[in-house]
Amino acid sequence: MNTDVENLFKDKVIGHPAGLFVIFFTEMWERFSFYGMRILLVIFLTAPLFGENPGWGWSSENALSLIGTYGSLLYLTPIVGGWIADKFTGYRVAVVIGCFIMMLGHVSMVFETQWSLYLGLALLIIGTGFFKPNMTSMISEMYKGKESKKDGAYTIYYMGVNAGAFFGMMLCGYLAENVGWSYGFGLAGIFMLLGLIQFWLAKDLFGEIGGKPSKVYEVELPQNINEESPVVQEENVPEKLNPFTTVDKVLMTLAAIGGLSYLLNDPISKIGGYNLFDFQLGGISGPYVVVLLSLVLFLFLITTRTIRYSSVVRDKIIAVSIFGLFTVVFFAAFEQALGSMTLFARDFTQRSLTGNSAMIFKIIDLILTVVPLAIITWVLYLLFKKTYSKIPYSNIVLALTFAFLWYVVFYKVNAEFSKETTEVGASWFGILNSFFIITLAPLFSKWWESKYNPSAAMKYGIGLILLGAGFGILVFGTLGIPQGAKTASVSMIFLILAYLFHTMGELCISPVGLSYLSKLVPGRMIGFMFGIWYLAIAIGQKAAGTMGGMIDKITEQYSLSTFFLIFTLLPIGIGVLSMALNKVLKKLMHGVK
């Protein structure tokens, strides 16, 4: 393995092995297809049944119920997919399997039937489970013995993630809204297929890296781009083992069955009318009884396991659990970006531009599209120079993929400049998060490396308050919209500023959350707690769908500003609580920074 690592580092691109950029482009195409499909999903489901580009006419509640379950399951299947790769397939084969299954999912969605949509989402969930955890595991193997360069590698990888999301939301959303939904879904599938072929043809470059199941379970943390390399905290005294008891396993199984049942039953009961838990207990409906009981069992499991550890380890797990609760709140509000905020962009934002405003937007959109693509194309050229003789066919496929991407970009730009007026697509606003991440991440990285680096609790507090402030901007922008209004023309500046604040909040929390987990939890527990952390994000995803689905009811009974006020007060309140708990959490963390 060391020989393979050294061979990879012989051919460098911008100071890193060429293999990293093969992974970069593979991840870019996967995120292109994933986010390109996801940004248009809520618009497609809720679009009117009749019109120039008819959708399915679903209510916001039903659409976001399905999307919430979908988003939640996306963070649960990687736990299984990572285990399968570790034990059976190896990372590289798992990535190929994941790409292929996701490509089939996108193809299925092109047909725009109810069953093809459900099948497509199921395939995307399964494929993501294979893909998501194993790309970063390959980077871990590539940088064994070269840990000092690993943070830089993950920064590059993180840029690939956001570049793919940026172009996917921009181009898939544009084709879907202006040409037809199937074109958006289809474009996502095409790039997924090309990414799969490119990665498979580059397999010789990696040697044995990612080719054999690991004998030692490791968890690599891709979000850890602004922190020091994770270290295993060694205790001064030997720790006794805390194996799972039979009672632990029974509790875990029952909680998992109950939670998954609720996730699946929620959209089924709302969309299909088949309620698996059609009963009431003490005035509480069956689905909520099931999910609350599952939550109680899960909390009992965590509590009973935690108290069996030594005091130091117990304190650290309590700190991780508190951060996990903050993470649920963060994602419940942050993920409104792909739900209620997209609906707000479509129905309540002034998107029709004329005259100078239209021309200014076209120029800004042109710069946002062409400049990043030109930079990434230059990286492709550098990769081509270094690896053409080793992986020529992979490079040819990659070049053809970029040529097709440039063609789609040219089509979009030409179509927009040929119009006298322009209407900004509702999906366009989704690119702002990726754009702000790419531009602001270096600044936040410098902040974390400076002497003013905040503690974990303060970072969470700042992030949650910034998130709430973003929704506060939307509250201010929607004050003039009357109760029950279905449409309005709020200036798009409010939505742009909201995305800016949300992204700054994300940079305070998302890239560093798993880093703190890796530092607080002993190495032998990292796999279990990694799963717990993803479970917290999954709960946040489902909460986002459930809460976002209330937009129509709250708007009718109160106002749209009231809806956004909920997402203003909740994160800010929890953010203030995090700051107030700073000293307590520092004590629980026992010196971990």
Image (cartoon, rainbow, N blue to C red):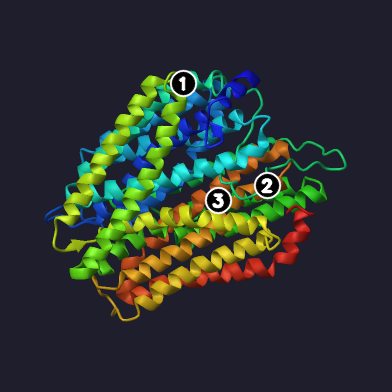
Sequence-wise, the earlier of marks 1 and 3 is 1
Instruction: Return the x and y of residue 369 as percentages of the image width and height.
Output: 32, 50
- Between disc 2 and disc 3, the foreground one is 2
Amino acid, disc 3: Ala
Quarter residue 562 falls in: bottom left
Coordinates of residue 7 in the picture (x, y in percent): 58, 21
The residue that appears at 36% across and 42% down in the rendered structure is 32
Q: CA distance from mark 2 to mark 1?
A: 30 Å
Judge by depth and name the residue closer to the eye, 303 or 549.
549
The quarter of the picture where the N terminus appears is top right
Q: Amino acid at mark 2?
A: Glu
399 above or below 500?
above
**Mark 2 or 3, nearer chain start:** 2
> Which circle marks residue 536 in the picture?
3
Q: Compared with residue 349, is residue 203 higher up or lower down, i.e. above or below?
A: above
Say the numbered circle drawn on residue 19.
Answer: none
Identity of the amino acid at label 1?
Lys
Left or right: 198 in relation to 57: right
Pointer 1 residue: 203
| Disc 2 target residue | 228
Task: Out of 575 and 179, give the one closest to the viewer.
Answer: 179
Give the residue displayed 39% in from the left and 30% down from the top.
99
Element type at marker 3? helix
Give the Cα distance between marks 1 and 3: 35 Å
